[in-house]
Amino acid sequence: MTDFTMQTDAEGVATITWDVPGKSMNVLSEEGIRTLDGLIDQALADPAVKGIVITSGKPDFAAGMDLNVIGALKEKGGAEAIFGLVSQLHAVLRKIERAGMDPKTLKGGKPIAAALPGTALGIGLELPLATHRVFAADNPKAKIGLPEIMVGIFPGAGGTTRLVRKLGAMQAAPLLLEGKLSDPKGAKSAGIIDEVVADPVAAAHEWVLKATDADIVKPWDAKGYKMPGGAPYHPAGFMTFLGANAMVMGKTMGVYPAARALLSAVYEGAQVPFDTALRIEARWFTNVLMNPSSGNMIRSLFINKEALEKGANRPDVPDEKVRKVGILGAGMMGAGIAYVSAMAGIEVVLIDAKQEAADKGKAYSTGLLDKAISRKKSTEEKKAEVLGRITATTDYAALEGCDLIVEAVFEDVGVKADVTKKAEAVIPQTAIFATNTSTLPIGELAKASTRPEQFIGIHFFSPVDKMMLVEIIKGAQTGPRAVAKALDFVRQIRKTPIVVNDARFFYANRCIIPYINEGIRMVGEGVNPTLIENAAKMMGMPLGPLQLVDETSIDLGVKIAKATRAAMGDAYPDGAVDEVIFAMADKGRMGKKANAGFYAYDEAGKRLGLWDELGANWPQSDDQPELTEVQHRLMMAQALEAVRALEAGVLEDIREGDVGAILGWGFAPWSGGPFGWLDMLGAERAVQVADALAETHGERFAAPALLREMAQKGESFYGRFGADRKRAA
Ligand code: NAD
């Protein structure tokens, strides 16, 4: 069985069907490229073949290039191997585009059409773009686009060059730079594909039999081609490129090499003939793949994220899929968990102390579904179906038959113990009980349970419907079935899990709090707050620490500080942070929700700029630190904490540490996560930076023993704890 097969019918139409054996979605492999090439040669040479239709044997067309192949190729053969493969791919697609026509007269080629039954992403769209006409099924669930930028690369199989020449740089920019996906109708109105029909294979078949010589010449191969919207030195084109450059730098702060390389490929490619442009695209693509950032992004955002979602760390126990979930507490978190569960087809019992509160929790789903309907992303039927799965009640008896409980009541040991007992009196002996606590030890909460081995933490992030990470926390007594249940649940609701051990703040909050605190501490020291915020953004953090604490609220910070101080006693290290944050709280500047925090807000809640009295309260020193020093403080505060979490066994797998950091708190995605970042820096340099910071700013920056040891041995995190040697021990 090969990935592509071909059959020619009596009318002379050769249908090439892409159907990778043993996979639910087509992805392109090296072998696949060779097979496709051979079939195209065969069809073009066969006088019985009048035209070619390329389609898929699966419900979707293709998901793109197999990124594992790219990773392996880079390791084996480096830049030369990558450039070689990409050039080979370009040659095949160019052969499809030219279809055997005479290069001078542009006559005599065979029409080739693509028929897309469903989703077509990445190379799955670059291939159709090389054909002469693209037909897509009228399938609103299908996604069409070039999302490569999302994993740190850009479309390098001619997609960049073709789309820009087809639509112009201005129209192509959001598709390429943001990886924007559309449904087939949207893709047609954007000019990416040509037709949306009920039966794309039949329509493509009919078209190739009728197409004329002129129909199959691409505009850029015809005489007198001009790029829509103008090439770079055309006045309109000039403005486009200037704007695009500014936009990209503004959005990415220049830390994403793929966005810059993409712009260069487009800019340089637009000034030369098509085939030269393809070569330029291939060179920039190779350049990006050789950059450690792209490798780290692919590793964390694609390969490892997928591995974790598929249960890389799932104990080997039978299926634990959830059928009926009981959610205790219908507040902000409970309401969100109910929504994502019901959306996944799970029956939900949503309990609160008062019926109004339970109803309000359910109404949250109504609101989200109404919004989706108004955006044409859902229907009244779907809404009725999803709401029909949620029972909002105060009656614990309704929990009968639940195989999973997720508790999200107030953050209070007593309240949580009470609801645990009430629920366990009703649910089956086999049910798993999970708590969504963000600060209380799982071991402590499990004391209220008669079945501590079935007790676990499932920690969601807010807002639940948007945040993709779920942190699963094992207590000392948590057993494998509970872990499997939590993982199967997270898989059902299509989020990404990490599994960590029970310790203060688990993993994500443990690392994010030092980041926020470092920013606040700097305000107290007199560092210019603009410098603090911009330093963070220039390292690729989505929010500066001061904006982040405004979003999560100052009073939450105060609450956590007080609880931590009470728990740690004299060892508490953050007195200097508290001085600032307690003063903010005293002034009533509780953050975004109060329309006043480190930032100022207008009455509608729009963030205006940093609060102009910060300087009056914490005078800025005349001697401002270097940008790099501020950046190192903010990054090391997080990364060293991640290493400590690994060292302490809270994290068991660095892949989880990296994926969790990006999805949980937006840790500089370009770096692939804290361990990816430290590997880029190198352990030796990381220790130097930490030592220098520790000397000037205090012991919180002391390099963990593990990092020091790695520096001495010349090791990297992925070298030492990579996929097959993942345990920290
Ligand atoms: P919330 O105050 O919005 O909701 C708590 C709900 O529990 C309220 O509706 C309340 O009426 C209900 N409740 C209280 N006691 C009850 C009882 N005895 N029986 C039934 N219902 C009861 O709080 P939240 O923000 O949704 O947080 C809930 C839990 O999730 C807490 O443990 C919190 O630490 C955790 N958490 C919160 C966030 C966040 O960002 N807010 C993130 C992760 C985890």
Image: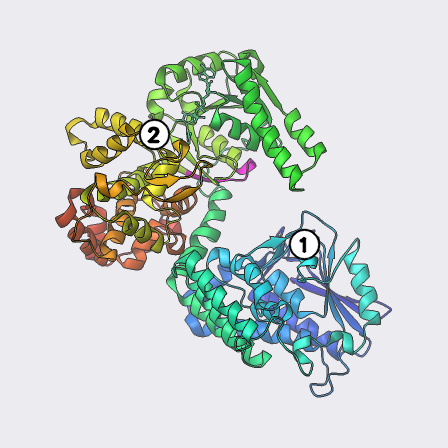
For badge 2, the amino acid type reads Leu
Q: Horizontally, is 627 left or right of 185 in the view?
A: left
Which mark sits nearer the N-terminus, 2 or 1?
1
**Residue holding disc 1:** 186
Is residue 163 depicted above or below 495 in this figure?
below
Viewer-side residue, 172 vs 7: 172
Q: Position of residue 7 (x, y in %)?
A: 77, 66
Q: What range is drawn magenta here?
A: 491-498
| 311 left or right of 655 in image | right
Q: Count the labels in the image.
A: 2
Circle 1: is it few (<14), some (14-19), or many (20+) Cα within 10 Å? some
What residue appears at the point 58 percent right and 25 percent down from the top-left corner? 363
How has the structure been colored for display? Answer: rainbow
Identify the residue under disc 2. 556
| Front residue of 196 and 73 | 196
Classify the position of ligand 1 by quadrant: top left, top right, bottom left or bottom right.
top left
Cα gap from disc 2 to disc 1, whole angstroms: 43 Å
Q: Secondary structure at mark 1?
A: helix
Relative horizontal placement of residue 188, taking residue 51 as reference (left or right): left
Q: Position of residue 720 (x, y in %)?
A: 31, 53
For the residue marked with disc 1, what is the amino acid? Gly
Foreground residue among 604 and 713: 604
**Mark 2 surroundings: few (<14), some (14-19) or many (≥20) residues within 10 A:** some
Snapshot quadrant of residue 398: top right
